[in-house]
Amino acid sequence: SVKTGIHKQIEALGLNGQFIGGHPMTGSERFGYANAKASLFENAYYILTPAKEVPMEKVSAYQTLVRTIGAIPLILPYEQHDYVTAAISHLPHVIAASLVSLVKNADSEEGVMKMIAAGGFKDITRIASSSPSMWQQICLTNTENISRLLDRYILDLNAFKKILDEKNADSLYRFFEEARDYRESFISASSGPIKTEYVITVDIADRPGSIAAIASLLAGHDISIKNIGINHNRELAEGALRIEFYEAAAAKQAEKVLLAQSYSIHTKKL
């Protein structure tokens, strides 16, 4: 996915007029055909990094191709692509892997940290399950950008450590408040791959048929479910069954239906 080296090779081969780099900003920590999805590219940014010599009509044709698979074409200079992806993709993988390593090395012999690691830790470290070979190569090819941003991140961590050691309540609050507000601005954006999710969680009995009963109840009221699954580790008093809907109206209707049947539910708009 790193374009700097590729563009230099293309230039050396004299193929500047034919090369358009492409990087779909989608996928997961899993790889291989078994983990493929038909909707993989839907509403995902697909970054194009054409060489300067490529005719505009060829770039436009590539943009059209990208749109036909449901993705959103975004043209960037390859240098900007490498810096941006270092910040929002490459460095997060380094951080996730380092957090896993920290717990591994700081845990007790009984493995208590590993045993009780719940949703928050698993969410932030999920991408540490990615291919070591792929991330080794990314770090070796986009080294300068990752290192630059890692320096900035280390400075930020040291600044946070200072206000933590000083027990500076106001600064601690502002730190978390600003991060929360900026993160929520991603979710409320009107376009792009990060969309608002409408979720309710339901406390259910641990017996056969519990999930099917809820699914049938909602289907009987013409409520479409986008996704449903068990929360094996629960935090913040959320329910055991997580149900996601396509729109807010469906989530509200489902809440009303389930409450009428005496289910205990929690709503969560992510």
Image: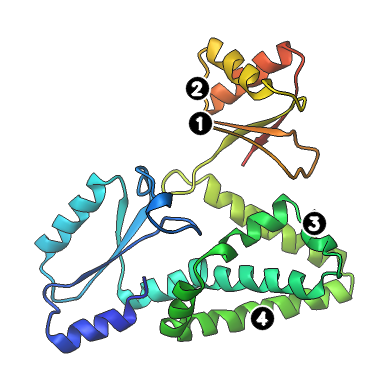
Q: Are marks 1 and 2 in contact (CB under 8 Å)?
A: yes
| Local secondary structure at mark 3 | helix
Q: Is residue 4 left or right of residue 180?
A: left
Residue 99 sits in quarter: bottom right
> Residue 115: which numbered mark, if any?
3
Q: Looking at the image, is mark 4 or mark 2 nearer the viewer?
A: 2
x and y percent of residue 245 in the render?
54, 29
Residue 105 sits in quarter: bottom right
Query: Would you place residue 79 above or below residue 173 in this image?
Result: below
> Residue 154: which numbered mark, if any?
4
> In front here: 128 or 208?
208
Q: Are marks 4 and 2 in contact (CB under 8 Å)?
A: no
User: At x 67% / y 81%, what residue is drawn?
Assistant: 155
Q: Earlier in the sequence, mark 4 or mark 3?
A: 3
Q: Mark 2: which amino acid?
A: Ser
Q: Mark 1: which amino acid?
A: Lys
x and y percent of residue 149 in the render?
55, 79
Instruction: Name the residue beneath numbered marker 1.
Output: 226
Instruction: Name the residue beneath numbered marker 2.
Output: 224
User: At x 31% / y 83%, what residue is drawn?
Assistant: 5
User: At x 64% / y 54%, what residue is drawn?
Assistant: 123
Q: Looking at the image, is mark 3 or mark 2 nearer the viewer?
A: 3
Q: Is residue 22 left or right of residue 199?
A: left
Q: Earlier in the sequence, mark 4 or mark 2?
A: 4
